[in-house]
Image (spheres, rainbow, N blue to C red):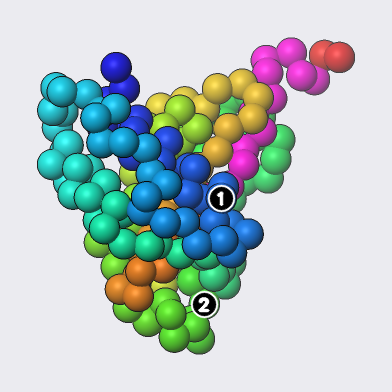
Amino acid sequence: MPTVLQHVLVVGIALLMVCASGVVTRAEELPPANTRSAQPSPGSLELEQQIQRLRAKNYRVLPLPLASVRSPGNPLPYDALSPTLEIVLPADKPQSLSAYRRRQLRCFDSQARIISSTWLSDRRFRVKSHRPLPIGSSQYICTLPADNDWLYWHSHTWIRADKNAGNR
């Protein structure tokens, strides 16, 4: 049985994929609530509240406006286990971003695990996983809701070389 976190991530990724083209996803399209685990996990109350808010509102999803993204280049060397991503939002951010909820910034890795995100200033945050990235392709995915029911997101793809990449 999937955990609440897995359910939220599946719903969130589905919303991002469907809505990235500008289509508005309706709450009725979300999976039924009875597919979640009966066993609560740490932080599950917050996740449950997020699910209920998604069900109650029609969220619109847009890419997060970016001023800059700083990261090591791809492909990452084999020994680059947990790279840091730094994102800067534009100073002249659109009106729709004026009320974004910084405290609700959430970032995940490709395995749907929550990863660390830290605000460095009003417009800049850093993302880093405490677990090593797998060999091959993986992602950091961040979502940032705003008061106007827009959900902004950014996805960064990493490609980590295997140990023998230079020997081929």
- The boundaries of the magenta stretch are 155-166
Quadrant containing the C terminus is top right
| Residue 23 locus on image (x, y percent) | 56, 61
Q: What residue type is labelled 1?
A: Val
| In this rendering, position of residue 109 left or right of residue 121 | right
| Residue 90 locus on image (x, y percent) | 52, 77
What residue is disc 1 on?
Answer: 18
For disc 2, the neighbor class at 10 Å (few under 14, some 14 to 19, many from 20) is: some
For disc 1, the neighbor class at 10 Å (few under 14, some 14 to 19, many from 20) is: some
- Of tags 1 and 2, the one toward the viewer is 1
Q: What residue type is labelled 2?
A: Pro
Q: Residue 90 carries which label?
A: 2
Q: Does the magenta stretch include residue 92?
A: no
Q: Tell me if residue 46 can be seen.
A: yes
In this view, 78 is above or below 76: above
| In this rendering, position of residue 164 left or right of residue 155 | right
* Residue located 57% across and 47% down the image: 17
